[in-house]
Amino acid sequence: MFKTEKVNEANKQRIIDFLKSDVIRHVFAFYDIQHDPQHTTMYAAFENGNLKGYILIYTATDVPSIILECEEGVAEALIEYAPQNNFIIHTPPNLIPSVQRKFQNEKHYIENWMLVRRDQAHYYKSEFVRRLNTEDDALRLAELVSNRKDRPKRALKKYIEWITKMPVYGLFLKGRLVSYAGSFLQLPQIWMIGGVYTQPRHRNRGHATLAVSAITKEALRKAETAALFVRSDNYSAIKVYEKIGYQKIGEKLWVDIGTGLRP
């Protein structure tokens, strides 16, 4: 019979040691409980001293982001620690029945989990791509992201904080930012790439390839691997990532519980 414990200073190192055995698989939990504990709550299920899985609630994002990673037999017990509504849960496909029993109005999307290693990457360079680092760059980023109907509005201050804390590369045409890609999590073992977006009227011109290439190049100078998630039906984006060297290593589900957001 398993028991569930809230992760705290007494058992935290035991959890970290387990996550360290496969940092790529557990990248978000491994990062959050060490680098952003004030926004992280985690519950772990143990059986005879062995970790059977965990649920992590992260609250620094626009809506709470939940990671459910566990054996099927403990999924429903761990899900009881999730909020009641308005959050996104990320979980392996085999756990969706447990999620659906708890949240009958869920809406989920399959995401390809893609990864590239240093010796696999192919880079594409452009004089129009550079790292964003000024307040004016943050303003251009805010203007570009405002075109996205699937993301909440943010104040300029958030974009300034974003490019100050995290590496973001953008492609500029005539002074206007038309495409960008960044990394929202950096570890020696892996950087997570995300936020890839190109203004609709500038798509299919190779701009995203150049932006993703730039952030991937920085990632692989400092980490062993770079990884990202992309909706499995976003064929144009998948083609971009494969061109740079990313390969599919698995699938995850993005499950919307009441937010209306999509990956």
Image (cartoon, rainbow, N blue to C red):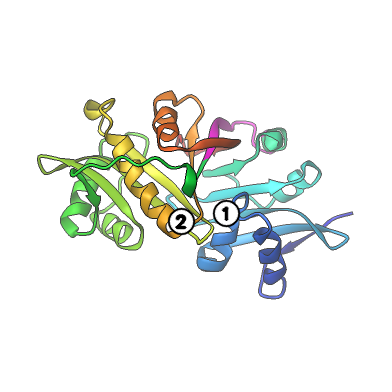
Local packing at callout 1 (Cα closer than 10 Å; few below 14, some 14-19, many 20+) is some
Secondary element at tag 1? helix
Q: Which mark is residue 187?
A: none
Residue 32, picture quadrant: bottom right
Q: Which mark is residue 185?
A: 2
- What's the magenta region? 100-114
**Dot 2 or dot 1, earlier in sequence:** 1
Q: Amino acid at mark 1?
A: Val
Residue 160, picture quadrant: bottom left
Q: Residue at x 29, y 43 (%)?
A: 180
Give above or below for 129 relative to 188: above
Q: Is residue 152 visible?
A: no
Q: Is residue 168 visible?
A: yes
Residue furthest out toward the left? 174
Q: Which mark is residue 27?
A: 1
Please name whichever residue, 181 or 71, is drawn nearer the observer in this view of the structure: 181
Question: How far is the residue under mark 2 from the one under mark 1?
Answer: 9 Å
Please name whichever residue, 101 or 223, is drawn nearer the observer in this view of the structure: 223
Q: Quadrant of the N terminus?
A: bottom right
Q: Is residue 130 left or right of residue 121?
A: left
Local packing at callout 2 (Cα closer than 10 Å; few below 14, some 14-19, many 20+) is some
Give above or below for 157 relative to 110: below
Q: Residue at x 48, y 38 (%)?
A: 246
Secondary element at tag 2? strand
* Residue 207 location (% of width, % of height): 26, 34
Q: Is residue 107 magenta?
A: yes
* Residue 209 location (% of width, % of height): 33, 36
